[in-house]
Image (tube, rainbow, N blue to C red):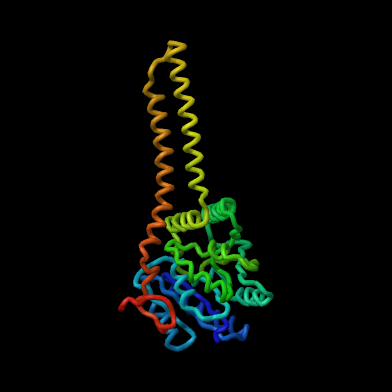
Amino acid sequence: MTQLSVIIPVFNEQANILAMYQRLQKVTEQLQVKAEYIFVNDGSRDQSAPVIKGLAGTDSNVKYIDFSRNFGHQVAVSAGLDACTGEAVVIIDADLQDPPELIVDLYKKMQEGYAVVYAKRRSRTGDGFIKKFTAKLFYRILARITNFEIPVDTGDYRIINRQVTEILKHMPEQHKYLRGQIAWVGFNQTFVEYDRQERLSGQTGYTYRKMIRFALDGITSFSRFPLKVATIAGFVVSGITFLLMIYTLYSRLILKNYEPGWASLMMTILFIGGVQLIGIGIIGEYIGRVSDNVRGRPLYIVKESNIPQQQHKFRHFNE
């Protein structure tokens, strides 16, 4: 029986894969556990896939899932969760910003009876001020607008037990936000603190565009707060409009000094129209996500893998 599964989503990380594998080997040797390393190639455009397949050819504990295209980081992790067999499952990125050596502490902490142990960042080296500030702001806003606690200053780096893994496999949302899903599941959860380092090499795949999309997935998946804001804004604008109507009638019928003004009229129309468009946009984001889930398309498509299909729940490209 596999005691530990390590899921490593990969996107253009050819320079880091070998170092990651070697450090993971040392960690599992230190823990003295039977481990499997599941590399999920998320449509990399470099030589990541051949490097992973080369490792798999020399070590039977190395498993790989090669997507037909880029489906996104969270989907890649989900594919690893579908395929893993370990009693404990670690999620870690391939860029080595999160030190694999911390798995020893995460694993030992889990043995104390915790279902989830996440790695909490004390500091972040190599990230710019804007990225640090926006990340910190997002996590704190999300924590305030959800009705359950989502840990702040954490990424996907964590260890979860088999029970939590099986629950996640039955949460098939198209727009994944695994940090929120794991927090929503509950059970005993705790953390281990660490200092995040710079990337070993290469460029991050998380552009600001992807970060914004990721933030939207997190907010719309676990909070109806934006809908409440749109509703409240609608009531506020309606109230202001009603007061303007009373003032207009009073000026026209009582004071007799009413003079129509193009500026005030345009300001009112634009203000009301802007609020309506914002409300429609927010509602559209939620409806779009519902539509994606209703279509029932597969979460990902596997081009190639060395994991027997009949034992795992994913679809091969050549079927």
Q: Quadrant of the C terminus?
A: bottom left
Q: Position of residue 42 (x, y in %)?
A: 40, 71
| Residue at 49% across, 85% down | 61
User: Front-most of 248 and 207?
Assistant: 248
Q: Is residue 239 left or right of residue 147?
A: left
| Residue at 40% across, 82% down | 309
Q: Position of residue 76 (x, y in %)?
A: 44, 70
Q: Position of residue 158 (x, y in %)?
A: 58, 70
| Residue at 39% across, 67% down | 71
Position of 24 relative to 243 (above/below) = below
Q: Position of residue 315 (x, y in %)?
A: 37, 75
User: Front-most of 143 and 22?
Assistant: 143
Q: Residue furthest right?
A: 112
Position of 99 relative to 270 (above/below) = below
Q: Is residue 88 visible?
A: yes
Position of 101 relative to 191 (above/below) = below
Q: Residue furthest left?
A: 318
Q: Is residue 152 visible?
A: no
Q: Quadrant of the N terminus?
A: bottom right
Quadrant of res 261 = top left
User: Front-most of 176 and 155?
Assistant: 176
Q: Is residue 118 left or right of residue 47?
A: right
